[in-house]
Amino acid sequence: MSDKVLMKGNEAIAEAAICAGCRHYFGYPITPQTEVAAYMAKKMPKIGGTFLQAESEIAAINMVYGVSSTGHRVMTSSSSPGISLKSEGLSYLAGADLPALVVNVQRGGPGLGGIQPSQSDYFQATRGGGHGDYHMVVFAPASVQEMASLTVRGFEVADKYRVTSMILADGTMGQMMEPVDLSSLKSEYNPEKPWATTGTGKKREHNIVNSLYLKPEELEKTNFERYERYKKIEENETLYEEYLMDDAEICVAAFGIAARVSKNAINEARKEGIKVGLIRPITLWPFPKAPFEKAANKVKTFISVELSMGQMIEDVRLSTHDKANYMLCNRVGGMIPSPDEVLSAIRNAAKGGKN
Amino acid sequence: MDHKRVIVLCGHYGSGKTNIALHIAKQIKSSGCDVAIADLDIVNPYFRTKDSAEELKKAGITLICSDYAGTNVDIPALPGEIYSLTEDRSRYAVLDIGGDERGALALGRLAPEIVKENNYEMLAVVNMCRPLTRDAASAVSVLREIEYACKIPFTGIINNTNLGRDTTPDIVTDSEKYVSEISKIMQIPVVMTTVCENVFDELKNKIPNLEKIDLQKKIFEEGE
């Protein structure tokens, strides 16, 4: 029998985390990510792992902090309002240089918003959310297979640089079903963690995991050092996909579910002879500046297709030095742009139209 | 195929109940009988029978589902009209039940009437390619949980084994052993095997009671 199964995006994240060696999951239910927790609840007890439904999101993220301090792979998942609650913990994880995987299956906002899909936590994910100078590595899957493979990669990147990786999906990616090849989901990279609080064995000094620095000089030094690591992440871990960009005069920028809809629209536009391509950021932080910068030499108009009021478009403008035309094609509040809506935006751009 | 008046579809998350329910309702309608389809799913937030509301209206099939399905109201609500499913015996009723033992609780309140009328089929939808029901034993254990919550015993199995767009005829033929094992353990027959158009022709003379089903359309499928 093949090792392919038909999975929901949320299930794929959970199964991939287990394949990556994660044996500790802490969470609190919220639509549309609940299947991650449900899957963990069924599987973890059978493999000697921990599934714990915490009393709140804040409790769950601090349990993640605790387990990560001991050097084990650990994760939590939630959806938009729940991630806001976890934000304090995200800042503390960053301040203590603890690796962890956090999943956000986004829903409409702000506030309680709604349960339908959204991408409006882009700023929150890429610009912080929590306080202080820090970054998370943010992955934006566009298929159920990527939900799985980027989860494994997320754990590895987190361990390598001692940072939090975030899977920034949306409700549709979490709920849709597609075939997934499980055989490819292995984590080959399991670095030593000499900083973990695993007991000194009376052979070394105590390891202390903490984000409080009594002297400002020391806090400044750690922040500078942390940003040196972020620089390495920008150099080594940026991911993106280019589609039909070789001769493109119009470039669609889209990630996740918006990229899938956009591809269908681009295929239609190509049939009409419009030279349009796609750059799909797979990491949102670090943002793939280089392919956009390069594209800006030929591309006249960039169309950012988003399930938000226009958040990623700021990174597109920054990466291309604001020298082209920019259009936003968006739906919000739980709505998804249709291929026809994206196609009209492309036609409009081809005629030289602006937003 | 011939149906009892009430057709109940149960099965694990993502086993394919909604698409099969739509298929059966359309089939009954096209044979000239009145039919209502009821979305009693109280656990799944997306991809509901309601997504096909327009198509059902055109076909003259009554849709009974929560006013809140497909909206932002995240509560397990059921409409009062569900009582018409058991009270109005002049039409067929196809019931699409939520994906686990909690989802199946919704059927509990209709169960006594359904059993009393004794003109029902309680069908277990299974897919060998789903991660938590890949072998007969785990499928049976999930089905037993659902059966217990529903309070109606299963009468038959629908084999909906598929890998989405990657489904091959071999995957479906491989699954025959799997469903016959489930059938043996549960002592109920396999009443139908459902496949999509891409493999139907190759399998139609090889598998008994093979049905070709359409899938609900989604705007983000690749290659559309």
Image: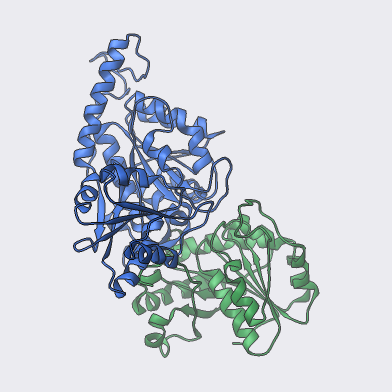
Q: Quadrant of the N terminus of chain B?
A: bottom right
The answer to which quarter of the image holds residue B135 is bottom left
For residue B121, above or below residue B66? below
Residue at the outermost top position: A215
The image's colouring method is by chain
Q: Quadrant of the C terminus of chain B?
A: bottom left
The hue in which chain A appears in the rendered picture of the protein: blue
Of the pair A114 and A271, the residue shown nearer to us: A271
Q: Identify the residue at horizontal 53%, vertical 40% (top origin).
A: A81
Q: Identify the residue at horizontal 29%, vertical 69% (top origin).
A: A274
Residue at the outermost right position: B87
Residue B156 visible somewhere in the drawing: no
Q: Position of residue A172 (x, y in %)?
A: 47, 57
For residue B210, above or below residue B150? below
| B104 relative to A34 in the view: left or right | right
For residue A190, above or below residue B95? above
Q: Position of residue A71 (x, y in %)?
A: 32, 30
Q: Where is residue B223 in the image (x, y as percent from the top left)?
A: 35, 71
| A308 relative to A236 in the view: left or right | right
For residue A308, above or below residue B80? above
The hue in which chain B appears in the rendered picture of the protein: green
The answer to which quarter of the image holds residue B201 is bottom left
